[in-house]
Amino acid sequence: MTNSSMFDVVTVGGGMGASALAIAMARSGARVLVLEKETKFRDRVRGEALAPWGVAEARKLGVADLLLNTCAKEVPWVEMGFGPRNLMETTPQREPFYSYSHPEMQEVLLAEAGRAGAEVRRGVTVEAVEPRGNLSATGEGTYASVTARNGNTIKVWARLVVGVDGRGSAVRRWGGFAVEKSPLAFQFAGVQLTGVRWREDLATFIFNPDAGMVLGMVPQTKGRWRSYLGYPRESGLALQGDDKLKTFLAEAARAVPIMAAAYANVESIGPLASFDVSESWAPHPFRGGIALIGDAAGTSDPSFGQGMGTALRDARVLRDALLRNPDWDNAGHEYAQEHDIYFQNCHKVCGWLRTLFQDPSAQAAALRHKAMPKIAEDLMRVPDHLFSGPDLPADEAVRARLFGEC
Ligand SMILES: Cc1cc2nc3c(=O)[nH]c(=O)nc-3n(C[C@H](O)[C@H](O)[C@H](O)COP(=O)(O)OP(=O)(O)OC[C@H]3O[C@@H](n4cnc5c(N)ncnc54)[C@H](O)[C@@H]3O)c2cc1C
């Protein structure tokens, strides 16, 4: 091991979660290396609406103003079919949505990681991570190691390797993490549009449970919009590829008829792609000198837009644990314990909301029949985790109130 190949933190991946952590740790004086396989970020159809509680996390990490001054637009209002709601007046964080093009946001944060003092290597694909303790008795056993390739093989060591390599995380596998899965029978499609006729300060998320659909539409900078459509897999729609744009728009208007006018003159300016929304997560995402954060630690159903807030929360919670605890093993375990609580809260509440607002089955319809009249009388029955964050209670009393059982 040479000095130039040893780091405090090495991140596998240079997306939102990795860059946020790299910025925070480099600003605190840690020696950080970011390894990102893409030389230029492109539109992979990802999250572009950061919920108010996620904006608060960005603020705690010191990147909220950076986002706003470079790529983000504030979207204070949300419409979920109950009338417009001002999030800046009604969330505990008093924050709006931040909306941006995902690849533009990634470029901004990764450049900032470099400015903060992290070493950023792009076009580098990590091929293996060896947990701490698996190596020889040369002293290397106290570090985790990373093998990567950009033409040549590179080997580096770190006190902490952070797997931030997204939904299909290989670090989960290399680190020997257990993985739990929750299969879900829905797909979620997205495409970037121009020419949408709609309020430019309003994010729209409307469920149509009879069709098993959810429509999302969020304004961005430069007249662009990110549009999403969630649909049951058994519909066979398979909204994938440019030739499916007409079907995407027609199905969106079928799910929410007022969209027909909003989408009358749109053009797509990016790929149209669909994703399986099934959730998967690594319980206790720390072992052997490897921490998982972001989608690598837990991939939530994108229909509920919690992934980026969670990636930022992970980066912030891990940073705080590392800075307050000189023993990084203890810090890793503290992070992992906290992660399990808020990720599972999100998982549980999204499950309730999916049943009540999206599931077209007869059982779910019966639950709606009981719950919806009471919700119409009192909207506060709907838990506000999607906007106000996963620290709100998610206990039996909250569930019973949502389903109109009390
Ligand atoms: C259709 C869709 C809509 C969504 N909508 C929302 C939304 O509205 N709001 C919200 O909050 N969230 C949303 N999400 C979720 C959100 O996009 C993710 O949670 C978020 O992007 C996760 O960030 P990350 O940094 O963990 O992973 P990623 O963004 O996936 O970044 C991983 C990075 O690792 C790199 N990488 C991977 N493997 C390697 C390797 N071996 N070596 C080097 N580099 C590697 C990749 O190139 C990539 O840059 C949505 C997701 C989808 C799919």
Image: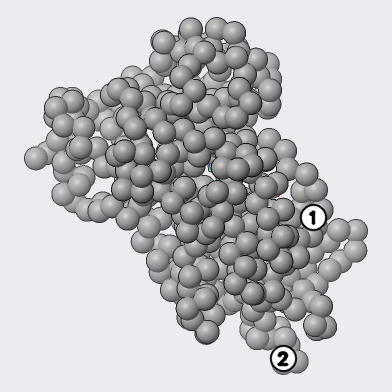
- Residue 396's tag is none
Task: Tell whether circle 1 marks a residue whose Cβ is less than 8 angstroms from ligand 1.
Answer: no
Seen from this angle, which residue lies furthest left? 406
Q: Residue at x 81, y 78 (%)?
A: 4
Label 1 sits on a secondary structure element that is strand
**Mark 2 lies on residue:** 139
Quarter of the image holding residue 72?
Answer: top right
Q: Which amino acid lies under the numbered mark 2 shown in the image of this protein?
A: Gly
Label 2 sits on a secondary structure element that is loop
In this view of the protein, can residue 114 be seen by the observer?
Answer: yes
Q: Residue at x 47, y 78 (%)?
A: 324
Q: Is residue 239 left or right of residue 403?
A: right
In this view of the protein, can residue 49 be seen by the observer?
Answer: no
Q: Which one is nearer the viewer's eye here, 84 or 163?
A: 84
Viewer-nearest of labels 2 and 1?
1
Give the quarter of the figure containing the N terminus. Answer: bottom right
Who comes first in sequence, dot 2 or dot 1? 1
Q: CA distance from mark 2 to mark 1?
A: 29 Å
Give the quarter of the figure containing the C terminus. Answer: top left
Give coordinates of residue 55: x percent, y percent: 47, 47
Category of crowding for the residue at label 2, using alpha-carbon neighbours closer than 10 angstroms: few (below 14), some (14–19), many (at least 20): few
**Mark 1 lies on residue:** 122
Quarter of the image holding residue 352?
Answer: top left
Q: Is residue 128 left or right of residue 373?
A: right
Give coordinates of residue 292: x percent, y percent: 56, 63
Is residue 247 positioned above or below 349 on the image? above
Q: Residue at x 52, y 75 (%)?
A: 322
Category of crowding for the residue at label 1, using alpha-carbon neighbours closer than 10 angstroms: few (below 14), some (14–19), many (at least 20): some
Quarter of the image holding residue 353?
Answer: top left
Q: Which amino acid lies under the numbered mark 1 shown in the image of this protein?
A: Arg
Q: Is residue 47 left or right of residue 395?
A: right
